Image: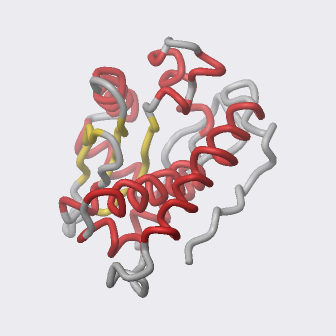
Amino acid sequence: MFELIDLPYGSSELEPIISAETIALHHGKHLATYVNNLNNMLPGSGLEDKSLEEIVACATGGIFNNAGQILNHNLYFEQLQKPSNDNHPVGKIAEAINEQFGSYDDFKKDFTTVASTLFGSGWAWLASDNDGKLHVLQMPNADNPVTKGLKPLMCFDVWEHAYYVDYRNRRPDYIAAMWQILNWKVIEQRYQL
C-alpha cells in the first residue's frame, strides 16, 4: 500500500509563490485521491509488490494514470523549498546545464517554453539518461520520463490544479515564479544517484 507523502515544509512556507490553499488542495486532495485510487486498484493486478517506478514503467490504464500521478507529484513536492531570489543549480547538475544549454538563463528559457506551450494538462521535465546527458521533455497527463528509460530530475506541474487558485489562467506567471522555490540540492542529489 502506498501512502501520501509528508511535505518537507509547512503548507504556508512556499507563499507567496504557492499558497497554503493550493497546497491543501493539490497535496491534501488531488494527490491523496491518486494514492487512494491506486491502493484500491492494485489488489489482484500482479503489481502489488512493485515500486512506484516499476509500476509506472510497465502498467497501463487506470493503474498507470494513478501511479504516474503519484510519482510525478512526489517528485514535484519534494523538490520545493521556501522562496529565494538567489536560487540556482549547484554541483554536477549546474555543470551539466552550463555545458548543454550554455547557461542557466538559457536553460530556464528552454524549459519555460516547454512548460508554457504544453497543450492541455501535463508536466515539463528535466531528466537525464544513463550517460548523464540532460533532456527537457513535455509530457502529457500522467506520463513520466521513466517510461522512456530516463531518470526524472525536476518537474513543473502544469495541470491547472497546480496553479489556478493563485494564478487563475496565467500559466506563464506560475512558471516564472516556480524558479524561486526549486531546491537545487534535491535536484542535484537525483542527478548524482
Q: Nearer the viewer, residue 42 or 21?
A: 42
In screen coordinates, is 78 left or right of 119? right
- Where is residue 188 drawn, in percent x and y? 47, 59
**Which residue is depicted at the point 32% across and 28% down?**
106
**Colouring convention used in this rendered image of the protein:** secondary structure
Vertical comparison of 163 with 147: above or below? above
Vertical comparison of 19 with 87: above or below? above
**Which residue is depicted at the point 54% across and 50% down?**
184
**Which residue is depicted at the point 32% across and 25% down?**
120
- Where is residue 162 drawn, in percent x and y? 55, 32
**What is the quadrant of residue 105 in the picture?**
top left
Q: Report the residue that reaches farthest toward the bottom.
A: 49
**What is the quadrant of residue 111 in the picture?**
top left
**What is the quadrant of residue 98 in the picture?**
top left
Q: Which of 136 and 105 is in front in this view?
A: 136
- Where is residue 148 drawn, in percent x and y? 18, 59
Quadrant, the N terminus: bottom right
Vertical comparison of 183 with 57: above or below? above
Q: Nearer the viewer, residue 87 or 177?
A: 177
Count of numbered tags: 0
Quadrant, the C terminus: bottom left
- Where is residue 175 drawn, in percent x and y? 48, 25
